[in-house]
Image (tube, helix red, strand yellow):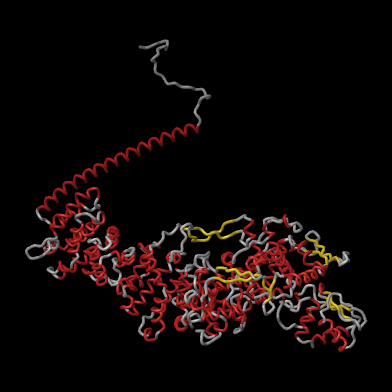
């Protein structure tokens, strides 16, 4: 009803609010719209999902009903003996695998196998009957598919009661005699079809899985009966159709079957017999693996454990079982090729694991990673601030002893001798395959790579040190094949080069020979397999390849080129070159410049680039450097960052080359680089000779130069790089007048060097050649004495930093420790001749057991004898023919390294406060000695005159007579003159232009009765105005040979 007052409560109208105070913003409106759209989209997806779920459920329901109906039909047909109908139905029923109906369908399959295994009145298996009908050829497809399903059923439950029936049925299907009644064409088609189907369905892999489930069930003297038919089924496809070269059945036989742990001992004897007659290792599997090496890293052989089982099985079949001996040189060649390829891919530490040396309490390091360390103690122990810390891999499970014993047979001297016979003897090699030498090289290098870190490593090398072998590998595998090794392209494609394996093998063997052989044997043509010219040619190849290895990198590095040699190979070549160079330094047989790679280097650019790379490594983070207070110095200024040679090779190509292969760069260039490094370091630290800010002061009593120097300067550390001003105090306690402009410090440093290197102080001993090395006595390792060694290192470092020569000679083995190099047996000759002779006798003694030696050494200090074990429990380990080389090396290491390790470490710590270790590694021992004390060469008077300052003479009569007299001096007289004026008898390495202060001759009055005098601190000769040659000569010789020196008048 109409309400004229509009008061009805149920009146319908739009609720419209025209106020703007509650209006919805555009942002809120858009959010609401977006939310509604998302809700509609979510609802649509839910509806679609519901439809799909319903569809799948209905499909599964229909399929289930279909499977049930089909099963009932097949069950009925099976009772009627319809083999073909049931078989075709089973293909459909098992299209998607066994599913959850395995028990029911498995029973049906078992009954079908029982029926199919029966024969008709003509003796034909019912499995085969359908093939006789006109359209029966597709039955072979059914047989192939069902064979795969039957084997899968066995794999699901190998111990089932129907397993024997199933395996028997498979043997019937794969028996060639089952098809004998068919026409030839039908036979061929059926066999090929069946084999092709199972080849694509993991036939071998499935059988291996079944066998591994059954093997643990073996009794001690009774193997599981199913293993024999399974073994026959492994080879059954080859009886239907002979294997072709790329048969997919062969790889799994290699990388699955042969990877079963202890395969020979896990199979019954009939099964082993069947394998040896139907699946020949040396005529089928190994040749295939040798030609297709990728199979050795596929399948189960991707695992290190399975690689080990594979090797153990090959060893059992080939060596223990005698198969290797029966198949001659062809079998040996493929054997070596396959094993070599497997061994080269095992992980680091594999050999130690096989030898049972892995500590269960430690994870094994596998790859170094760079981490930053702020631990000050690392620097004190000589560790870099940025150090390589090994990452770890999970612990290896200890290997069963039976398996490790079999694998280690590969590294025995007897086995290697057997293989070497075919390499060395011409009668064998004449009919050998072309690849024999390469295969042998691959095998040996694989052994060496795999057993690195294990005692077997050295045993292998000892077994290979055969003169005939070395000559054969050199002449047929290396000589003349690396003529272009100085070209970059050779290193770029190193791993693809077919001549690489013999070169690597020869390098391993000859490196070992160089390590163990004393100089007398090395230079004897009766004991050295190679002539001097051949050694130099081989070392030239090493140098070339190592050079490019440092300049352009290695595989796995930043270059990304995996065809280059790896870091291990580069290091191997480097060690070879270094050992030949060191041998040449001890007894010259080649021009030292033969190692220089001049044509590959832009020397000027090389120097600039090396200095730049060094500066980049030590770029400061703090611009404010105050050298006065060493405690305020930042860490980078107090001690430069220390890098190993290996790190340098990764970080910087040129510094890596200079630190690892310095002989490839001319000596003069390296000297220039060394001086440039120091100049760059001075610029980095802001050192200015004329600045008064960066100075340290020391007051030195002349009668206590060493002690005062130690007290005043010993704690400065790297701050010694700054200028040191010396004030002398005479014996009366009076301060001497004069300002140190550099001369007083040189005088102090010269006198200090004479005192601290004096052997009467007890810190140093001298060899027969008067070369110094740290005193090995235990009192020299006391903390106070070690502080002195550190200070002496700093003193020598300061001299080198300032370019001052020190008249001191160090023993080669001590200098080698500066460079991080190994000491050798020949180095012991300079330290202890009697011990050296004894070790040479031991090295060549036919029966070292008769000498009754053990791995211990006896020391006598002040009448007290003590026995020191060279290895844990060394006094209980006798020296024999197998371990004598190790004993000799340990004795050398003890005498040349361990005895002086603490003293040397303290000395090096002091030295490295001023001189970066990588700067020193640019030189060998002889060059380092020249860097310290000058060059052992004839003194060039013309060069001295060209860089000499002559001052104060009223005319040129005396200077002209001086140079005439000096020109006529003998070499020893020239040395005496140089020692008299500069305190060092050897000239500077780069000539007198680098002597600081400059050599000077000064007028010292007209009193010709006086002798010449010298101020060694200024390199100044004070010469009276002699007017006759005879007088000048006599007076000068008297002065320089009388031992007089500073300010003598």
Quadrant into which the C terminus falls: bottom right
Q: Nearer the viewer, residue 653 or 662?
A: 662
Counting from the top left corner in percent of width and height, residue 638 is at 69, 59
Q: Nearer the viewer, residue 679 or 425?
A: 425
Does 59 appear above or below 873?
above
Residue 303 in which image quadrant: bottom left
With 986 as the anchor, is 822 left or right in this view? left
Counting from the top left corner in percent of width and height, residue 127 is at 14, 61
Look at 40% across and 81% down and name the residue there.
423
Taking the view exactly as shown, the residue that stands out farthest to the front is 863
Residue 621 visible at all: yes
Does 265 appear above or below 960?
above
Look at 42% across and 77% down and name the residue there.
438
Counting from the top left corner in percent of width and height, residue 452 is at 48, 68
Counting from the top left corner in percent of width and height, residue 588 is at 61, 83
With 584 as the anchor, is 458 left or right in this view? left
């Amino acid at each position: 009803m109409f309400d004229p007052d509009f008061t009805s409560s149920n009146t319908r109208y739009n609720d419209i609010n025209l106020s703007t105070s509650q209006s919805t913003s555009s942002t809120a409106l858009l959010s609401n719209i977006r939310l509604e759209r998302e809700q509609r989209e979510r609802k649509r997806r839910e509806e679609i999902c519901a439809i799909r779920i319903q569809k799948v459920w209905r499909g599964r329901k229909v399929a289930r009903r279909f499977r049930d109906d089909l099963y009932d039909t097949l069950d009925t047909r099976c009772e009627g003996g319809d083999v073909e109908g049931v078989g075709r139905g089973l293909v459909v029923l098992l299209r998607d695998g066994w599913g959850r109906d395995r028990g029911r369908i498995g029973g049906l399959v078992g009954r079908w196998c029982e029926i199919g295994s029966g024969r008709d009145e003509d003796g034909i298996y019912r499995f085969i009957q359908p093939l006789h009908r006109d359209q029966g050829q597709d039955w072979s497809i059914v047989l192939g598919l069902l064979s795969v399903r039957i084997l899968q059923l066995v794999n699901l439950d190998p111990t089932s009661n129907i397993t024997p029936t199933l395996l028997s049925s498979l043997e019937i299907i794969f028996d060639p005699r089952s098809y004998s009644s068919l026409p030839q064409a039908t036979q061929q088609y059926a066999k090929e079809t069946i084999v092709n189907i199972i080849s694509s369905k993991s036939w071998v892999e499935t059988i291996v899985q079944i066998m591994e489930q059954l093997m643990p069930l073996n009794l001690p003297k009774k193997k599981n009966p199913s293993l024999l038919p399974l073994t026959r089924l492994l080879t059954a496809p080859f009886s239907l159709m002979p294997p072709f070269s790329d048969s997919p059945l062969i790889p799994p036989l290699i990388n699955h079957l042969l990877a079963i742990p202890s395969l020979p001992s896990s199979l019954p004897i009939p099964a082993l017999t069947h394998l040896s007659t139907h699946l020949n290792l040396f005529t089928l599997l190994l040749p295939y693996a040798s030609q297709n090496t990728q199979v050795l890293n596929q399948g189960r052989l991707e695992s290190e454990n399975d690689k080990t089982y594979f090797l153990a099985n090959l060893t059992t079949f080939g060596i223990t079982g005698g198969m290797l001996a029966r198949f001659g040189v062809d079998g040996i060649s493929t054997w070596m090729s396959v094993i070599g390829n497997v061994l080269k891919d095992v992980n680091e530490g594999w050999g130690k694991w096989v030898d049972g040396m892995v500590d269960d309490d430690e994870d094994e390091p596998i790859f170094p990673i760079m981490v930053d360390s702020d631990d000050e103690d690392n620097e004190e122990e000589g560790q870099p601030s940025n150090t390589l810390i090994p990452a770890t891999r999970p612990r290896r499970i200890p290997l069963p002893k039976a398996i490790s014993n079999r694998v280690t047979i590969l590294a025995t001297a007897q086995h290697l001798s057997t293989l070497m016979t075919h390499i060395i003897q011409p009668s064998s090699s004449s009919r050998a395959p072309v690849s024999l030498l390469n295969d042998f090289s691959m095998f040996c290098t694989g052994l060496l790579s795999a057993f690195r870190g294990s005692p077997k490593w050295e045993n292998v090398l000892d077994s290979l040190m055969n003169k005939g072998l070395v000559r054969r590998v050199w002449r047929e595998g290396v000589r003349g094949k690396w003529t272009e090794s100085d070209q970059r392209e050779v290193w770029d494609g190193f791993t693809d080069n077919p001549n690489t394996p013999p070169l690597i093998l020869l390098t391993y063997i000859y490196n070992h020979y160089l390590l163990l052989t004393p100089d007398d044997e090395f230079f004897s043509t009766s004991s050295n397999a190679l002539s001097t010219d051949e050694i130099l040619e081989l070392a030239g190849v090493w140098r070339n390849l190592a050079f490019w290895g440092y300049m352009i990198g290695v595989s796995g590095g930043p270059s990304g080129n995996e065809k280059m040699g790896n870091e291990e190979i580069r290091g191997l070549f480097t060690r070879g070159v270094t050992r030949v160079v060191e041998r040449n330094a001890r007894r010259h047989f080649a021009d030292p410049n033969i190692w220089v790679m001049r044509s590959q280097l832009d020397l000027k650019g090389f120097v600039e680039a090396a200095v730049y790379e060094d500066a980049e490594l030590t770029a400061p983070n703090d611009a404010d450097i105050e050298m006065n207070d060493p405690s305020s110095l930042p860490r980078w200024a107090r001690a430069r960052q220390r890098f190993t040679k290996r790190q340098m090779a990764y970080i910087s190509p040129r510094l890596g080359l200079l630190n690892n292969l310095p002989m490839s760069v001319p000596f003069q260039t390296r000297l220039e680089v060394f001086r440039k490094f120091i100049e760059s370091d001075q610029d980095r630290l802001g050192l200015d000779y004329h600045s008064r800010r960066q100075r340290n002061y020391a007051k030195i009593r002349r009668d206590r130069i060493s002690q005062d120097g130690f007290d005043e300067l010993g704690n400065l550390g790297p701050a010694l790089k700054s200028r040191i001003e010396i004030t002398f105090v005479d014996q009366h306690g009076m301060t001497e007048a004069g300002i140190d402009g550099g001369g007083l410090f040189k005088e102090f440093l010269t006198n200090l060097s004479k005192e601290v290197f004096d052997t009467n102080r007890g810190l140093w001993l001298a060899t027969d050649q008067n070369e110094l090395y740290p005193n090995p006595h235990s009192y020299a390792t006391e903390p106070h004495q070690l502080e002195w060694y550190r200070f002496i290192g700093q003193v020598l470092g300061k001299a080198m930093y300032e370019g001052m020569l020190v008249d001191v000679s160090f023993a080669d083995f001590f200098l080698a420790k500066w460079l991080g190099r190994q000491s050798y047996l020949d180095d012991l000759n300079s330290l202890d001749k009697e011990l050296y002779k004894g070790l040479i006798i031991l090295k060549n003694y036919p029966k070292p057991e008769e000498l009754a030696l053990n791995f211990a050494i006896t020391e006598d200090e002040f009448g007290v004898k003590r026995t020191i074990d060279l290895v844990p429990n060394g006094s209980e380990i006798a020296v024999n023919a197998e371990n004598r080389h190790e004993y000799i090396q340990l004795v050398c290491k003890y005498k040349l390294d361990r005895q002086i390790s603490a003293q040397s470490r303290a000395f090096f710590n002091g030295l490295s406060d001023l001189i970066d270790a990588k700067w020193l590694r640019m030189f060998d021992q002889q060059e380092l000695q020249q860097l310290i004390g000058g060059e052992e060469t004839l003194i060039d008077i013309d060069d001295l005159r060209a860089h000499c300052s002559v001052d104060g003479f009223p005319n040129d009569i005396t200077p002209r007579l001086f140079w005439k007299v000096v020109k006529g001096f003998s070499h020893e007289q020239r040395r005496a003159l140089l020692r008299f004026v500069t305190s060092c008898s050897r000239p500077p390495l780069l000539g007198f232009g680098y002597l600081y202060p400059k050599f000077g001759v000064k007028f010292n009055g007209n009193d010709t009765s006086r002798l010449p005098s010298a101020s060694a601190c200024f390199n100044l000769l004070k010469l009276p105005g002699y007017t006759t040659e005879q007088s000048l000569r006599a007076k000068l010789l008297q002065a320089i040979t009388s031992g007089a020196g500073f300010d003598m008048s």
